[in-house]
Image (spheres, grey):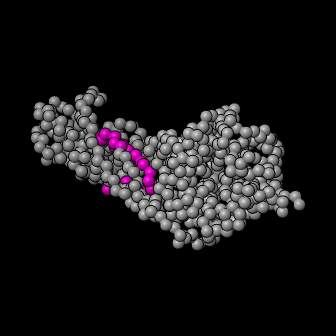
Amino acid sequence: MKTKLCFFIVLTCNFIIAQGPNGSIDFNSSPYSTKILPSYIRAKPSIISGNGFNFELLDAGVSTRYAEIGSGFFRNKLIMVSSKKIGGLAKIDPNTHEAFKELFCLDIDRNGSLSSPLLFSRIINTNDSEDQLTFSPNEKTVYYTRSSKENSLEFKLYKAELEEDSHGNWINNQLLSVNEANVSIETPFVNSTGDKLYFSANYPDAIGGFDLYVSTINADGTLGEPKNLGNTINTTANEKYPSLSPDNKYLYFASTGHENIGGYDLFVSKNSKNEFQVPRNMGNTINTVYDEIAYFLAARNKAYVSSNRPNGKGGFDIYTATNNEIVQSIKGEVLDLETQIKLPNTIVILKDDEGNEIAKTITAEDATFSFNVSPFETYRISTQKEGFKAATVNFFANSGSETTYKKDIELHTTEPVIAKVENEMRIVLENIYFNFNKWHVKEESFITLNKVVKVLKANPDMKLAVNAHTDNKGRESYNLSLSNKRAASAVNYLITNGISKARLVSKGYGESKPLVDCKTSCSESDLQTNRRVEFVIVE
């Protein structure tokens, strides 16, 4: 009986899944509702709660009494490694007492469930065991592992290329230079930019049994010298099954070390400034005292994972894993350091730990800001406001549960400057703010007027003309009256704070001296520029 090969019928397979950004697979909500939280989970308290993950696992619908393990995606299909028997003449591996492993491919429906498996390729699959494989971003190169003839538990790394205009003819199969005698190279993964190959191996320099390594993929297709990912990632135990998020910022892997529940657990490490950070256990809603391996993202918060937990059908089974995101936010106020006056209209920018802008806002009238953040991430919050020194504060989202963090930011004022402007000597300052159609100085502008007080007290012979200007909206006579009242209001503040009335004079000019003569075609920026208070030194 002939066996169907998945790749050779690729043009007739049922493509009913939608593809999202970065090649992600867009699932709709699963029709199942049972969350797998088995009673046999026994975890350390720090892993039970506060890990920042909340997974729901569902059977992907392809499990049998043999082992099924996911191995990434090819042409919108999941590739699977399995020891399920094909036909009655399956060769049995004496080390595992199951059939030698083969590669299969499976269609994915909108709910993430998988179709019946078909053999992936008669060229890649042989009489030996084929294990994990990975593809270049253009899917024209495959890196795969195959057991040696002498030892079915020792795997070597190969590469093959897809023949142009063929339907599955993989050519130029070759054993790669990173292989060594008595070394098993396993679970390869190519990053989304196609320039790095991650894998697990038991090289002599490994910290534990199996460590994670990375090799550069050179322009000619050769691999660079394998580099151990170091003791932040690797332990004296085993690390396998590396995979990365589409943006290459997060490394997922399985380990029997680190802060472990039992067996292989899944961990995640953030790549920050080209260094992997301390890994986090992905928690007891996905990990158990058994083995959880082969975590492959299909969408931003959906993945496939393989586990040999006892409620499965036998061996390793494949599950869909949905991460119900933990909602967190950071809120605060921006304040003047000296007076604690609230500072509305401050630009506040949220950045990641590498300085990339994530979000931006402007503080409201009550000087508040708010951003959504993710658990266990490091952020920088920077501010920009006229008349104040730019500030940056660091923030670490240190909780794994739904949380609102509070972080107020205090700003230092800039020093006032005396300079010549339009043939006049002035105290050059940020603008003075008033409520719409009002003349009482807003509280945030007390800080600016305090700078004027400071200059006048430092220069007791100095006299000042406080000149107010409006935009050209409204009647000219009204604007003139309003500007006179605003100039007088500023002068009254200075007098109240110890400046002699004899040293001050106020005058309103209304709309008669615009800085931007835009007439009837003024933009909001033009109008704001023309609304101003000037402090002119008269003696």
The image quadrant of residue 192 is top right
- Residue 2 quadrant: bottom right
Taking the image as shown, residue 339 lies to the left or right of residue 220, namely left
- Residue ID at (81%, 50%): 122
Quadrant location, the C terminus: top left
Comparing 503 with 323, the one in front is: 323
* Residue 328 lies in the magenta-colored region: no
Residue name at image x 60 percent, y 56 percent:
293
Q: Is residue 192 visible?
A: no
Task: Give the x, y percent position of residue 406.
Answer: 34, 56
Q: Residue at x 67, y 53 (%)?
A: 71
Q: Is residue 388 left or right of residue 458?
A: right
Q: Is residue 148 above or below residue 317?
A: above
- The quarter of the rendered structure image containing the N terminus is bottom right
Tally of numbered discs: 0
* Residue 6 against residue 539 in the figure, above or below: below
Q: Which residues are magenta?
A: 366-392
Q: As drawn, which residue projects farthest toward the right?
A: 1
Nearest to the observer: residue 142 or residue 239: 239
Residue at the spot 58% in from the left edge and 59% down from the top edge: 292
Q: Position of residue 390 (x, y in %)?
A: 34, 40
Is residue 390 part of the magenta span, yes or no?
Answer: yes
Q: Residue 512 location, x and y as percent?
A: 32, 39
Q: Where residue 531 appears, x then y in whole percent?
A: 33, 43
Seen from the viewer's position, the closer of residues 301 and 498 is: 301
